[in-house]
């Protein structure tokens, strides 16, 4: 028993946790710049009308939402030859998805040059641009889902203890935050306003760095003997019960109140983050009237806020020992730190740097609080079912998160249409020249970068506070039951 404990401790060392945390860096490195530039690239640089830009993004979001639970369902039910022969379950899928995903990101920006350049050329090639946009987004998201569902579903199996999850989450949160901010402060240096081809250079650079990041996460996602044994037990349990159809599984997931309340809360945080992320380039160009490279200090301040707050959230989490309360505090922190950003028209560059430093503290809190709480929820589900189906629930978790992307596109389309933002305006001077209501258009950017996301966070905080029922006592009881059940 002593040797077994020592072995498990070695297999889940902090070095392994850090390597597993690199999956967050890897994902955020691409998705961070994706969130900032893709919608902006097609609306502002290519000149695709906002209705078409939003429609493509909404259709992509619908597919994005559907394929996550579908892939989650399949990943827990498909027993591939490599699993039966070697016991590995998720690593091959991660490799199959991750490497092509990097290339798919580049593909998004490779719009043929003959299709854009003037409003007339864009109008003549409107549907060709739209099709390129939509198809490349579908390819990008399918590959992302394949690797992401498997990496996230590995977390509850790989890290079992409460303290172990907190340490792994703390390390992963710091690494992930570095990843998301690096994706926001480094790629912008390759982008030049009014030069659509510069986005291709940025994407190729992101791909090269992505390869290096992929190899750094391999030790953390390696499926050791302990993990393969857990997979074997789970597979045997699934084979012993009648295979549940996809739609029956869907009904069961949606009827789980605790899980649904948790994902609604997560949707609020993700939708808010997606809005402020996608708004960043608009803020720099049309509020501050600066080059894209100025994002470096702004988003670097956000990283600093998150990094400084991590030790604090770690201490608070251990002393509090209440994941529900920590989630609520994280939600309120994020809401409060949105307030200075609501006055963005009156903030200078330094003001935005300070405001984003504060917002980074709120974002860091959310990042830190979410994985342990989701682990609690999945433990609760495992006890109800008598087996683990983590990929299924992570897939549905991603379904509701992905709705945040559609929410972002719809918000942009409505706000830009109502406030007179004109697509193809690449600078503040062009916006003043093209828009009938330029000041209103600028205020619209404040609406979708601060006001709407703050309101979304506020509503989801209330829902979580009111109906989430996993108390510390129930979590501790569930841990005991899991040991008894051997899952």
Image (spheres, rainbow, N blue to C red):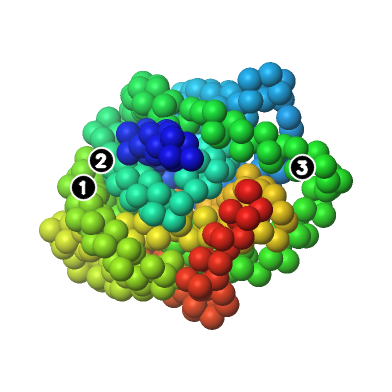
Residue positioned 63% across, 25% down in the render:
87
Q: Is residue 196 above or below residue 38?
A: above
- Judged left or right of residue 410, residue 236 is right
Residue 238 disc label: 3
Q: Secondary structure at mark 3?
A: helix
Q: Residues within 10 Å of mark 1 (few under 14, many from 20)?
A: many
Q: Residues within 10 Å of mark 3 (few under 14, many from 20)?
A: some
- The one nearer the camera, 284 or 81, is 81
Does label 3 or label 1 sit earlier along the sequence? 3
Does label 2 or label 3 sit earlier along the sequence? 2
Q: Which residue is mark 1?
A: 300
The answer to whether residue 401 is visible is yes
- The one nearer the camera, 100 or 214, is 214
Residue positioned 26% across, 35% down in the render:
186
Q: Are marks 2 and 1 in contact (CB under 8 Å)?
A: yes
Q: Is residue 357 above or below residue 189?
A: below
Q: Are marks 3 and 1 in contact (CB under 8 Å)?
A: no
Q: CA distance from mark 2 to mark 1?
A: 7 Å
In front: mark 2 or mark 3?
A: 3
Residue positioned 75% across, 37% down in the render:
236
In front: mark 3 or mark 1?
A: 3
Q: CA distance from mark 3 to mark 1?
A: 46 Å
Residue 35 coordinates in the image, percent (x, y)? 42, 45
Q: Residues within 10 Å of mark 2 (few under 14, many from 20)?
A: many
Residue 185 disc label: 2
Outermost residue toward the right in this view: 242
Q: Secondary structure at mark 2?
A: helix
Residue positioned 67% across, 34% down in the render:
232
């Amino acid at each position: 028993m002593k040797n077994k404990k020592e072995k498990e401790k070695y297999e889940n060392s902090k070095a392994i946790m850090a390597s597993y945390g690199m999956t967050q860096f890897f994902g955020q490195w691409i998705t961070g710049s994706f969130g900032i530039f893709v919608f902006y690239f097609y609306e502002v640089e290519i000149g695709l009308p906002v209705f078409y830009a939003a429609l493509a993004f909404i259709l992509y979001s619908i597919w994005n939402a559907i394929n996550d639970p579908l892939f989650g369902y399949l990943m827990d039910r498909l027993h591939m030859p490599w699993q039966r022969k070697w016991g590995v379950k998720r690593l091959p899928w991660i490799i199959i998805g991750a490497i092509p995903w990097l290339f798919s990101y580049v593909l998004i920006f490779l719009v043929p040059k003959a299709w854009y350049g003037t409003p007339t050329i864009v109008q003549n090639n409107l549907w060709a641009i739209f099709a390129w946009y939509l198809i490349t987004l579908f390819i990008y998201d399918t590959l992302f889902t394949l690797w992401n569902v498997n990496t996230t579903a590995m977390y509850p199996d790989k890290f079992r203890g409460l303290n172990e999850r907190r340490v792994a989450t703390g390390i992963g949160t710091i690494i992930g935050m570095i990843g998301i901010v690096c994706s926001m402060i480094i790629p912008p240096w390759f982008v030049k306003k009014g030069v659509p081809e510069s986005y291709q250079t940025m994407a190729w650079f992101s791909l090269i760095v992505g390869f290096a990041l992929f190899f750094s996460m391999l030790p953390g996602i390696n499926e050791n003997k302990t993990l393969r044994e857990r997979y074997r037990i789970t597979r045997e349990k699934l084979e012993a019960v009648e295979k549940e159809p996809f739609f029956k599984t869907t009904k069961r997931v949606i009827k789980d109140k605790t899980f649904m309340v948790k994902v609604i809360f997560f949707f609020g945080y993700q939708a808010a983050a997606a809005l402020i992320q996608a708004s960043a380039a608009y803020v720099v160009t049309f509020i501050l009237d600066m080059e894209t490279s100025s994002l470096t200090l702004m988003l670097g301040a956000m990283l600093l806020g998150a990094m400084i707050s991590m030790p604090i959230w770690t201490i608070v989490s251990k002393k509090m020992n209440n994941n529900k309360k920590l989630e609520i505090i994280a939600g309120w922190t994020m809401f409060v730190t949105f307030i200075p950003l609501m006055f963005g028209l009156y903030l200078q560059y330094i003001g935005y740097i300070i405001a984003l430093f504060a917002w980074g503290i709120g974002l860091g809190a959310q990042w830190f609080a979410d994985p342990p709480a989701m682990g609690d929820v999945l433990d609760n589900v495992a006890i109800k079912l008598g087996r683990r189906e983590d990929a299924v629930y992570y897939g549905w978790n991603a379904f509701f998160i992905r709705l945040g992307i559609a929410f972002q596109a719809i918000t942009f389309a409505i706000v830009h249409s109502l406030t007179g933002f004109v697509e193809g305006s690449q600078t503040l001077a062009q916006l003043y020249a093209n828009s009938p209501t330029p000041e209103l258009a600028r205020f619209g950017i404040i609406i979708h970068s601060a006001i709407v996301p703050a309101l979304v966070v506020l509503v989801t905080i209330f829902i979580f506070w009111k109906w989430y029922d996993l108390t510390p006592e129930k979590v501790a009881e569930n841990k005991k039951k899991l040991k008894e059940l051997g899952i």
